[in-house]
Structure formats: structure tokens, C-alpha cells
Amino acid sequence: MDVFRQFRSPAAFVDFAKGESDMPTYRRSSRTKGNREFTGTSSWEEATRLAHGWQEGARRFAQQSAKLTPKGRKPRRTTAMREVGPGVLSMGNYLTGHPQPYVTLQETNRPRTGKGKVVRFLVNIAASSKVNSSVIERRGAAITALVSTLERAGRRCEVVAVSRAYEGASSIEYRITLKSSQEKVNLPSIAFALAHPSMLRRLVFSARECEGKEIRDKVGIGKGDGYGIPTDIKEIESGTIYLSAMRGRDAQWKSETAATAWIGSELKAQGIELK
């Protein structure tokens, strides 16, 4: 028995995680008070507030990303429309009665919206209970910095979070689109989803608690401290940057230096070098 759910936005997933469950509250790990070292929050209420935007994390991650400056960022040429000259008359605008029929070219450092190669991320946010909160945050910060740097370099990024738990022949899998290729980076939202332990250990746990009793029993949800065994995704679309489930033995997340080196290697794979 398998359950697969796809959410088009973080907000849609949060709404689902807030749903009704027939599990007794005292058995729901998502509602356990205290336990900040494991979940990063002291209560379910605190976690759901942060789920709408982790501002403190976003500020710290923005500072980290700002230190990563891609080489060769050349000014791009864009058009500015004007009601009258100077400029070039756009016949298309003129003939359709556009109020600004004249266009001029100007220089900007911003990448063109909707242009450039699309880089797709599939980030497995599942983690074993032995993975420290600091490791989850360090990995999430590195991924967030990588996405921000790629966007500044003119790459469009699509970011999807995935969490899959199984036991025996049954599984529960969620996929959450955190950012489409056409959207700007919403740093507070992505920071929480990728780097805050409460995303998994309160929000995802709560979503699993909202599933029917039959599937919960098959996957082991609520049996002791069990919430299913974290597992990786087998079928990955070619060209996708896939981040596997965390099990505490990934060397690149052991230190800030190692995480920064990982960012550099991923940027280089995309043809981007740092200054």
C-alpha cells in the first residue's frame, strides 16, 4: 500500500499538515512540547509560525550567499518603454495602441526573467533520528546559497522537496514544489523547508499523522518513536541535482568549510566559477 501526494506550494503542504488526525495527541510526535534540540522548536505552534517564513534563518543564509560572487557577471541589455522619444518606435506597440510605443536599451545586472538554463533540484528532506539539527541546518543553508547564487548568475532554478518513508511493502511520499523556474527565490520560505528541522520533525510528521490508520500502521507511524524508515528516490530525471536522505555520514555537511566546498563544486559543474 502506497500513498503519494504532490503539493504545488509550501502553503498547500502546511495546510495539509494542519489537518485533522484520529491519533491521540499524546502519541503525536509533531505535537510534543519542548524537545528543541531535536525539532528546533518548542511547540507545534512555533513551528507553524516559522513555516510561513523563517526570517532569522533567511537573514543568516543571505549573508552566506552574498559571499559567493560568480565570475563574469556581465551587464545585460533590457528594454525600457517610453511614451515619446528618445528611442526607437516599436511598430508592434504602435499598431496595437500601446501607451508606450517607444523603446530604448539600458544596462542592468539583473538576469533576464525567464531566460537561461533551468537547473532542477530534488531535495530529500528525510533524515534519520541520529542526524543532528545542526547538520540539517548546515545542509539546507548550503542548498539555499547554491540556488541563490545560480539565480544571480542567470540560471533559473526549480526546487522540489521530497520526503519518503516506508516499512515493508508500504510507503508514504510527499513532493512539495518550493520554487518554480519562473518564480523569484522566497528565501524565508525555502530556508524553513530545506534547513529547519521542524519541517521534517513537526510538519512532515504531522502530515503522516493525518493519513488513515491503515497506512499509518503499515508504515509504522506512531509505533513507539517510529515514523517510517527514510529512503531515497530511485527514479531521478536526467540532469536533476538530487540530494539524498540524511543518515549522518555525509562528509560534505560536517563543517561550514566542507559545505562551502560542495557549493563550489556544484557551481563548477554548472559552468560557474566564484571570484
Image (cartoon, rainbow, N blue to C red):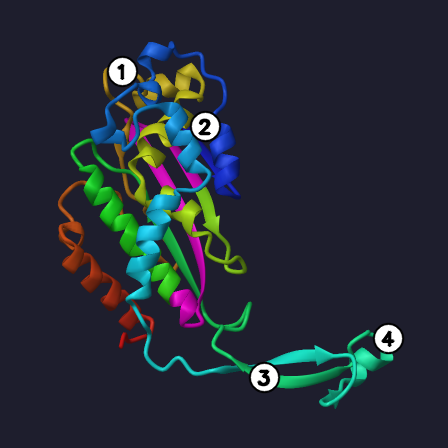
SS for tag 1? Answer: loop
For label 3, count other residues whose C-alpha is less than 10 Å away and answer few (under 14), some (14-19) or many (20+).
few
Position in image of residue 260 (x %, y %): 21, 61
Q: Is residue 151 magenta?
A: yes
Mark identifier at residue 106? 3
Does residue 135 sit above or below 269 in this rendering? Answer: above
Which comes sooner in the sequence, label 1 or label 4? Answer: 4
Position in image of residue 52 (x %, y %): 46, 38
Image check: 73 left or right of 33? Answer: right
Q: Are marks 1 and 3 in contact (CB under 8 Å)?
A: no
Q: CA distance from mark 2 to mark 1?
A: 19 Å
Q: Tell which tag, 1 or 4, sits nearer the viewer.
A: 4
Q: Are marks 2 and 3 in contact (CB under 8 Å)?
A: no
Does residue 226 sit above or below 72 in this rendering? Answer: above
Image check: 76 left or right of 200? Answer: right
Q: CA distance from mark 2 to mark 3?
A: 47 Å
Quadrant in which the C terminus is drawn:
bottom left
Q: CA distance from mark 1 to mark 4?
A: 67 Å
Q: Main secondary structure of the magenta part?
A: strand
Q: Identify the residue position indicated by label 4 in the image.
A: 97
For label 2, count other residues whose C-alpha is less than 10 Å away and answer few (under 14), some (14-19) or many (20+).
many
Q: Which residues are magenta?
A: 150-175
For badge 1, the amino acid type reads Lys
Q: Nearer the viewer, residue 275 or 20?
A: 275
